[in-house]
Image: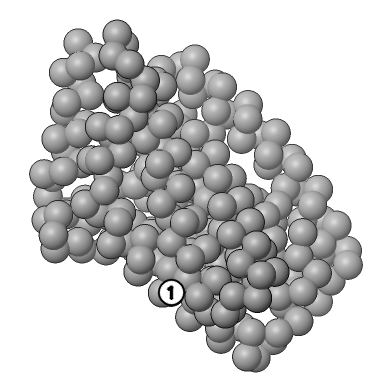
C-alpha cells in the first residue's frame, strides 16, 4: 500500500501538469511524524522569536526591513516557476536573502509565518505538515544560507558570488530535507537511504535549475541592499 502511494507521489512530482502546491501537502505525513516535526519547529520558532526580539532591541529602526523581507519571502516562495526541461512548475524558497540580511533566527520566524499564511490562505502545504515544512525551509534553508554566506565572506569571496551560492544551497538543502522527511515517513520495508535517493531524484529536474535561479535573485537582492544600506549586513545573529 505504501509503495503504491509513494509511486504515485514520485509520478506526480515528475510528470504532473503545472501545479501550485509546494512542500509537503496536508495529510501526507503520519500523525507521529507530523507531531515530531511540529515539536522541533516550535522549539526553533521560540528560539527565533527571542533572537529576533534581541535584534530589534538593538536595531529598532530596522522593523520595516523585517516587514519587507517577510513580504518578499512570501511573494517569492509562492511564485510558480515553469521548468521547461521537466514540463512542470516548482517554487523557490526565498529564505536565502532573509537569512543573509537579518540572520538565522530572524529568518526562521519569517519562514514560519510565511508557511503558516500560505497554508491558511492558499492551501500551499498544510497545517499538519507545517512543522515539517518549517524545519525544511525556515530552519534548514535559513541555516544553510546563513552559514554559507558567513563562511564565504570570511574567506573574502566576492559578496555577490557568496550570496549566489548561499541562495542556491538554501533552495537545494530545503528540498533535500523534504525528501528525507518523506522517506522517513513513507519508507515501510524499504531502506531509508534508497528511498531518500528516489525522492531526491524526483525533485531534481525542477529544483536543480530553480536553485540556480534562486541564487541569482538572492545575489541581486543582497547586492542592491549592500549598495543602498550596507549597514543592514552588519549586526546579524
Q: Is residue 165 visible?
A: yes
Q: How many marks?
A: 1
Q: Quadrant of the N terminus?
A: top left
- The image quarter in which residue 93 lies: bottom left
- The image quarter in which residue 217 lies: bottom left
Instruction: Name the one closer to the observer, 226 or 134.
Output: 226
Q: Is residue 234 above or below residue 209?
A: below
Position of residue 138 measured from the top left corner of the image (x, y, whole percent): 56, 48
Q: Is residue 127 visible?
A: no
Position of residue 229 measured from the top left corner of the image (x, y, whole percent): 69, 86
Give the crowd class for mark 1: few <14, some 14-19, many >=20 residues within 10 Å.
many
User: Which residue sits at x=69%, y=61%?
Assistant: 103
Regarding mark 1 in the picture, which secondary structure is present there? Answer: helix
Q: Is residue 178 above or below residue 100?
A: above
Residue 72 as seen in the image, left or right of residue 109 = left
- The image quarter in which residue 40 lies: top right
Position of residue 70 measured from the top left corner of the image (x, y, whole percent): 58, 63
Q: Quadrant of the C terminus?
A: bottom right
User: Which residue sits at x=76%, y=42%?
Assistant: 47
Q: Residue lying furthest front in this view?
A: 155
Instruction: Name the one closer to the observer, 30 or 87.
Output: 87
Amino acid at each position: 500500500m505504501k509503495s503504491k502511494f509513494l509511486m504515485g507521489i514520485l509520478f506526480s512530482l515528475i510528470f504532473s501538469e503545472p501545479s501550485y502546491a509546494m512542500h509537503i501537502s496536508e495529510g501526507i505525513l503520519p500523525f507521529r511524524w507530523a507531531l515530531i516535526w511540529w515539536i522541533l519547529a516550535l522549539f526553533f520558532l521560540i528560539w527565533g522569536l527571542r533572537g529576533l526580539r534581541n535584534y530589534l532591541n538593538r536595531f529598532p529602526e530596522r522593523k520595516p526591513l523585517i516587514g519587507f523581507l517577510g513580504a518578499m519571502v512570501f511573494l517569492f516562495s509562492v511564485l510558480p516557476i515553469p521548468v521547461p526541461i521537466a514540463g512542470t512548475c516548482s517554487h523557490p524558497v526565498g529564505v536565502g536573502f532573509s537569512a543573509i540580511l537579518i540572520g538565522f533566527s530572524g529568518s526562521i520566524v519569517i519562514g514560519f509565518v510565511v508557511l503558516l499564511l500560505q497554508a491558511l490562505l492558499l492551501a500551499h502545504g498544510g497545517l499538519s505538515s507545517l512543522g515539517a515544512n518549517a524545519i525544511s525551509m525556515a530552519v534548514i534553508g535559513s541555516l544553510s544560507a546563513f552559514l554559507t554566506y558567513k563562511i564565504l565572506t570570511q574567506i573574502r569571496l566576492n559578496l555577490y558570488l557568496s550570496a549566489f551560492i548561499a541562495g542556491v544551497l538554501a533552495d537545494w538543502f530545503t528540498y533535500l530535507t523534504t525528501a528525507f522527511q518523506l522517506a522517513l515517513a513513507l519508507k515501510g520495508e524499504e531502506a531509508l537511504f534508497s528511498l531518500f535517493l528516489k525522492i531526491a531524484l524526483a525533485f531534481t529536474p525542477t529544483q536543480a535549475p530553480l536553485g540556480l535561479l534562486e541564487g541569482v535573485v538572492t545575489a541581486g537582492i543582497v547586492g542592491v541592499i549592500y549598495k543602498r544600506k550596507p549597514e543592514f549586513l552588519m549586526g546579524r545573529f
